[in-house]
Amino acid sequence: MTERLDLNAARPEPERAELLGWMFGQLHTEYGERPLVPRREPMHELISTILSQRTTHQDEEAAYHELRELGDWDAIIQAPTEQIAHAIRRSNYPESKAPRIQATLRAIREQRGGYDLDFLADLPVKDALKWLTDLPGVGVKTASLVLLFNYARPVFPVDTHVHRVTTRVGVIPRMGEQAAHRALLKLLPPDPPLLYELHINLLRHGQKVCTWARPKCPACVLRERCDAFALYGNHVPSFSEKPAKP
Ligand code: SF4
């Protein structure tokens, strides 16, 4: 089945903000509270998030572990790039990630004289995001994860699961993940614990229920207000960022 072009027609911003607030409540009831506690130190979060792109959590962890066996960050900068690519081979696209990781580490050392990122806690959010996204291997998702998870800054990371669920329900019109960061953040209060819980619960919902193919709509707590379910019932098609051509 192909998606109809009228899925997710634009609705007014206050309505979308209210819908997102309702989703937060539904997911809170379903999955419970998620306290904002850093899961790993900032440099670990930063490099692991680069490794996580198109990679399972298990493979990301294995790649990070093997990378750190090469030594400290200085040693990783100095190692031959092929050796880095070999160490992170459990992550997808190791040949392109290896030079990006080395370039990122080198840029951090040049600008900060080391690898302490705690200055990000005191920068205005806009400047902290810019500093991180100016690093060679860091996009807005990675930067947002570090700022929210490690420094409790009011940003909202959008990964593939957050993007898919919010688009299907109809909180945002169809757009790329990058643009969705800005669109969703505008609808949310600057409340880091809430932003963290919503991110984690949407991710979990996208992994378990609102999967890319064959979402489990009969078991979904968002069903009663979901645009995709209203259009397709129990046959919501596989997700794509752009609707299929008629
Ligand atoms: S009703 Fe279906 S498409 Fe809508 S959010 Fe739930 S699982 Fe996803």
Image (cartoon, rainbow, N blue to C red):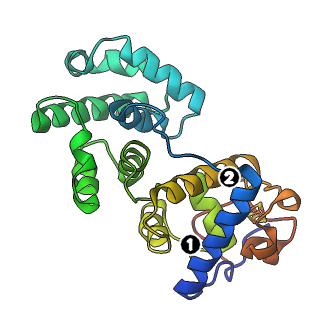
Q: Would residue 190 appear left or right of 59 to someone viewing this image?
A: left
Q: Specify the quadrant of the image occupied by residue 4.
A: bottom right
What residue is drawn where x is 80% and y is 68%?
223
Q: Residue tagged by mark 2?
A: 206
State the SS at label 1: loop
Instruction: Say which of 98 and 11 sits in front.
Output: 11
Q: Would residue 221 appear left or right of 57 to someone viewing this image?
A: right
Distance CA(mark 1)–CA(mark 2): 17 Å
Asked whether residue 243 is in view, the answer is no
Disc 2, ligand 1: is the CB inside 8 Å?
Answer: no
Residues packed near mark 2 inside 10 Å, few (<14), some (14 to 19) or many (20 plus): many
Give the answer, above or below, for where 111 lies relative to 88: below
Percent x, y for residue 214?
80, 55
What residue is drawn where x is 80% and y is 66%?
1
Residues packed near mark 1 inside 10 Å, few (<14), some (14 to 19) or many (20 plus): many
Which one is closest to the eye, mark 1 or mark 2?
A: 2
State the SS at label 2: helix
Q: Would residue 155 appear left or right of 213 to someone viewing this image?
A: left
Asked whether residue 209 is in view, the answer is yes
Percent x, y for residue 154?
40, 59
Q: Identify the disc placed on residue 32.
A: none
